[in-house]
Amino acid sequence: MSYLSNIYNGIKTLLTGMSVTGKYFLNARKGAITQQYPDNRATLKMFDRFRGEVIMPHDENNEHACTGCQKCELACPNGTIEIIWDRGIDEVTGKKKKKIDKFVYHLSMCTMCGLCIDACPTDAIKWGQNFENSVYDRTALTRVLNKPGSKVRAGIED
Amino acid sequence: MNIALNITQTFQDWLVGFMPEGAASITAMVIVAVIYLMIFAVAGLYLVLLERRVAAWFQLRLGPNRVGFQGLLQTMADALKLVSKELTGTDRADKFLYNLAPYFVIITSLMALGIFPFTQGFQAFDINIGIFFLIAISSIGVIGILLAGWSSNNKFALIGAMRSGVQTISYELSIGLSLLTMVLLTGSLQLSEIVETQKHGWLIVQGHVPAIIAFMIYMIAGTAETNRAPFDMVEAESELGAGFHTEYSGMKFAYFFLAEFINMFIIACIATTVFFGAWLSPFGITESLPWLGVFWFLLKALILVFLMMWFRWTFPRLRIDQLLSLEWKYLLPINLINIMLMAFLVWQKLTIQF
Ligand code: SF4
Ligand code: SF4
């Protein structure tokens, strides 16, 4: 009897499979997952966990959250990040204090491993969505992430 | 528009007017062969395109849609690219057999196309043992595959070719027996007469239960015959590179590729002719317009081709022992019982006829 039930089960499972793909086939026009990239550049939205490049968000007062602690520089396995720092005077307390001068990021060396972003205690750096990074000269891939004239947001170190 | 039963004959009669009989018949054959060759080379390319688009839709992709409107010229461009490619070969390959193999495959598949009745009278060659000819010719293709595998001097190719041999020998039985089941109903092997008997209802309706079983067996065995997934152990990209055509490049590869698609079309055409009334329209709605037969024939054949594509993009590949047990333990016994059932129906006149 198991012979006949084998045949029955075989046909049944095959038909189940075919109904699944059949539904896909009918819905392909609406739900195609293919992105027609250069054509839809204006509307293209990358997914949340996409790792394009490391960026440092600045708020409307041109302030970022980087304290210059250099943890990201230490965490980076291939020396992509260079923090050039300086000592300044804290206006409130009048003490000497470390602050960043330049956050240098060599995109050409970055492996997008994400260790720097995990290491940052103040979430000053994040993943950006841009992936169109081709340039004619690789020095153009060396970027300074903190904007000129920016300073650390007050209270971020507390 | 009433042309004779056989288009080669029509051409011949026309040519006899200005050349001797022998020369006329040879010229007529050559003309018809060249016309068929051109039509089906292009049709084969479009089948490849269809497969790629359909496969894409099954996987929620878009498929080729850049070259020409909606990608209509894509496979033409591919063919042009393949023509311009270098023909490489392996060291110490058996050069003669290596070069011969693709032609075996492509010629046999094109020869089979000659006898299909595309519509009333549109048939290149109405041979009186049509079904037998089709079964015979479709198993010659495997010689090409075996030769290709053997002469390539490549282990993967040889394994692929041997698998193909095993597979074709096994499934040839099922194809033959399932078609024989239908021949019991028609009482003739000639394709035009098979169509004639279907004027009282398509054979799948006339033969009801055993005909449907025979159709299912035929579709399974037919998919196996064309070496398509889920029976594509001959190529089995993940195990064998590309199986028997691993070492082929350029146009010779294209022959194998095209032959696969033409074979798929042939399997669908046989099923259309034997089970679904060839060019007859459903319920005879366009009986007065015989030229619409081409449309009905192609429509039915393409639906069956689509079914095979659906199989391909749904089912996982079988293991070789599963493949053989499917044939020898399931399809063959069912087929033998089915043929007796059909004989009983025909004997007791239990068939449905309008
Ligand atoms: S980005 Fe973060 S980890 Fe790196 S120096 Fe600034 S605060 Fe420290
Ligand atoms: S993602 Fe990795 S490689 Fe790139 S800067 Fe951060 S730690 Fe360095």
Image (cartoon, coloured by chain):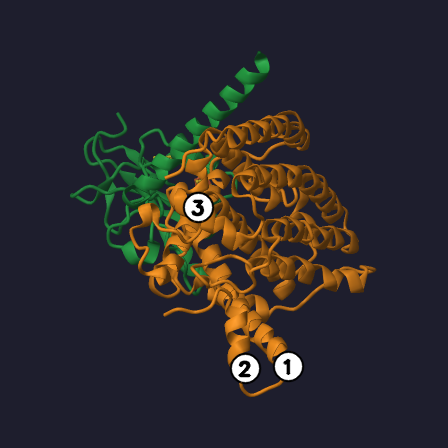
Chain colours: A green, B orange
Image quadrant where one finds the N terminus of chain B: bottom left
Q: Is residue B167 above or below residue B294?
A: above
Q: Which mark is residue B23?
A: 1
- Left or right: where does residue B100 sit relative to residue B37? right
Both labels 2 and 3 in a single chain: yes
Q: Which residue is denoted by mark 2 in the rendering?
A: B15
Say what amino acid the circle numbered 3 marks.
Answer: Gln
Give the alpha-carbon distance from disc 2 to disc 1, as whole Å.
9 Å
Residue at position x 46%, y 46% in the image? B197
Residue at position x 67%, y 50% in the image? B136
Residue at position x 51%, y 52% in the image? B193
Q: Which mark is residue B303?
A: none
Say what amino acid the circle numbered 2 marks.
Answer: Leu
Crowd around label 1: few <14 · some 14–19 · many ≥20 (10 Å): few
Give the alpha-carbon distance from disc 3 to disc 1, as whole Å.
37 Å
Residue B124 in the image: state x and y as whole percent.
53, 65
Mark 3–mark 1 contact, CB under 8 Å?
no
Q: Is residue B335 above or below residue A107?
A: above
Which residue occupies the extreme right position in the image? B92
Chain assignment, label 1: B
Mark 2–mark 1 contact, CB under 8 Å?
yes
Specify the quadrant of the image occupied by residue A45. top left
